[in-house]
Amino acid sequence: MVQLTNIGMKENRNMLGDYEVMSFVGTTDPERAKAFYGGVLGLKLVEDAWWAIIYEVGGRHLHIEKPPEKFTPVPFTALGWKVPDIGAIVEKLAKKGVKFERIAELQQDAAGIWTTPDGVGKVCWFKDPDGNLLSMTQFPK
């Protein structure tokens, strides 16, 4: 009989929780994605590889994948940013042509910002050129 107690406990305790996460979304039009993520959102381009466009975002990497086949974006938020002043950023992005999503079940202000039921958090949603749903959230200070 093999005793499994403590086998691999050190490795399992730390697993992936101690490592940086990378994010991935897809695009069917890499040039349009570069114009949006780099030009409109202002992300720093790290590399435009044959398989993905890679940006640095908050010290992490975001890969805009170039899949060989058409894909359907997920029907929920794919990426989100924690921001200090959602109103100011929404205003800047709107001036660059970003359209903010309206969610039928939520009461949003004129800019498309929803205030959480506790009155302290604020969230808005918008899509990239491929239809990936993106969000920004302002948490209480």
Image: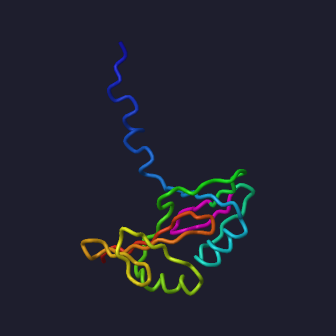
Q: Where residue 101 appears, x then y in whole percent?
A: 48, 73
Q: Where residue 48 appears, x then y in whole percent?
A: 72, 63
Q: Where residue 28 appears, x then y in whole percent?
A: 69, 60
Q: Quadrant of residue 98?
A: bottom right
Q: Image quadrant for the N terminus?
A: top left
Q: Image quadrant for the C terminus?
A: bottom left
Which secondary structure type mostly characterizes the magenta part of the structure? strand
User: Residue at horizontal 41%, vertical 84%?
Assistant: 110
Q: How many marks?
A: 0
User: Residue at horizontal 65%, vertical 70%?
Assistant: 45
Above/below status of 68 relative to 108: above
Above/below status of 6 relative to 74: above
In the picture, measured across the screen, residue 80 lies left or right of residue 7, that is right
Above/below status of 8 relative to 66: above
What residue occupies the far left of the structure in this picture? 118
Range of magenta residues = 52-63
128 or 14: nearer the eye?
Answer: 128
User: Residue at horizontal 57%, vertical 62%?
Assistant: 61
User: Residue at horizontal 68%, vertical 70%?
Assistant: 34
Q: Look at the image and say whether residue 56 sits in the magenta stretch.
A: yes
20 or 74: nearer the eye?
Answer: 74
Q: Quadrant of residue 128?
A: bottom right
